[in-house]
Amino acid sequence: FLKSVQAGLNPVAKTKTEAIRINAEVHGLGPRFKLTVKLQNTSSVSLTPIIDLFLSFTYDENIYNLNPNYIEIPILINGIEYGFCTFVTCITDKVISDVIKVFVCRRDTTAPLISAVINMPVAEPNLAL
């Protein structure tokens, strides 16, 4: 499984008929962030939409909580960029940051089609008034 995960760590996934581009944006100062993952079907060979995908995340559960941590992607139409959002909460009092890994997977395969590693910023302390 580890080899299949490592094999999917690239910014553009390409097969004979499919190509997916991924990028991510982190918004906020913390301890709560908005993470937007953007996907685009960039295939120049086929105009067929890509269907039955999902986003999955891996992260240190001692540092972060994600809601939701699984996002279904029903369809990616060629040429349109889609944004999928999750909220990240830093749940530790330590002044640290870590990475969050995003995997785009198809329901019928075990290896991710594409993945990204997001370097999270250090969260501002949670100031309770």
Image (cartoon, grey):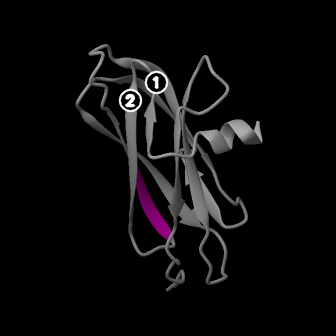
Tell me: 101 left or right of 3: left
- Which is more toward the observer, 9 or 28? 9
- Which is more toward the observer, 123 or 1? 1
Task: Identify the secondary structure beneath mark 1.
Answer: loop
- Which is more toward the observer, 76 or 42? 42
What residue is rendered at 44% in x and 46% in y? 11
Residue 95 x %, y %: 61, 84
Q: Which mark is residue 15?
A: 1
Task: Give the amino acid at mark 1.
Answer: Thr
Tell me: 108 left or right of 45: right
What residue is rendered at 49% in x and 74% in y? 121
Residue 7, by quadrant, is top right
Q: Which residues are magenta?
A: 32-37
Would residue 37 be visible to someone looking at this image?
no
In reply to whether residue 39 is colored magenta, the answer given is no
Residue 93 x %, y %: 66, 80
Residue 38 x %, y %: 36, 44
Would residue 22 be visible to someone looking at this image?
yes
Residue 29, placed above or below residue 66: below
Task: Give the amino acid at mark 2.
Answer: Ala
Q: Residue furthest left?
A: 79
Q: Give the CA distance from mark 2 to mark 1.
A: 6 Å
Residue position for label 2: 19
Q: What is the chief secondary structure element of the magenta stretch?
A: strand
Confirm or deny contact between disc 2 and disc 1 (CB under 8 A).
yes
